[in-house]
Image: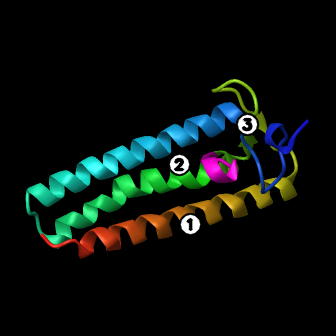
Amino acid sequence: MSSEQTYIPGTCNIGPNEIKRRRQAAYFGLILTIIVAVILLTTHVSHLVRLAIVIPAMIFATGLVQSSKKFCLAFGLAGIFNFGQLGSTNSVESAADRKADRRTALGILMQSFVIALLLTAIFELIPS
């Protein structure tokens, strides 16, 4: 069995179906980010209001990081994993494994937040 099909604590907690779902979330977040950016730019709102772009950018970044790392942030925090059909999960039994998963999940959250903040900062540089 390849590592893509096997739970590895702190490294891999989702299989191909879940990875595809995270990739779709990234695409959705990207499209939403572009739509919101166009709306905010064409309505000439203040730079303070333009900071709202961070929300769809976070959706994009979180999906992107999770799909590339083959690790679900929510599953890591909840102590579960899934390599089967969507909607089915297994529990992580070991306390040490759950701790490793939580650490990775928090790292993914931080990475996603940094990416979303960078995208927001770049967007803020665009003249109104």
Kindly check if marks 1 and 3 are in contact, taking CB atoms under 8 A apart as contact: no
The dot on residue 63 is 2
Q: Secondary structure at mark 1?
A: helix
For the residue marked with disc 3, what is the amino acid?
Answer: Gly
Q: Give the class, few, some or many, for how many residues have Cα within 10 Å of label 3's Cα (few <14, many ≥20).
A: many
Magenta span has 107? no
* Residue at screen point 63% across, 63% down: 106
User: Residue 70, image x and y in percent?
Assistant: 69, 47
Q: Outermost residue, top direction?
A: 85
Residue 88 visible in the displayed image: yes
The residue tagged 1 is 111
Q: Is residue 10 left or right of residue 45?
A: right
* Residue at screen point 66% across, 31% down: 17
Q: Give the class, few, some or many, for how many residues have Cα within 10 Å of label 1's Cα (few <14, many ≥20).
A: some
**Sooner in the amino-acid sequence: mark 2 or mark 3:** 3
Q: Secondary structure at mark 3?
A: loop
Dominant SS in magenta: helix
Kindly check if marks 2 and 3 are in contact, taking CB atoms under 8 A apart as contact: no
For the residue marked with disc 1, what is the amino acid?
Answer: Gln
* Residue at screen point 40% across, 70% down: 117
User: Residue 14, image x and y in percent?
Assistant: 72, 40
Residue 15 occupies which quadrant of the picture? top right
* Residue at screen point 70% across, 34% down: 16
**Number of numbered discs overlaid on the protein picture:** 3
User: Residue 6, image x and y in percent?
Assistant: 85, 40
Magenta part of the chain: 67-74
The residue tagged 3 is 15
Residue 43 occupies which quadrant of the picture? bottom left
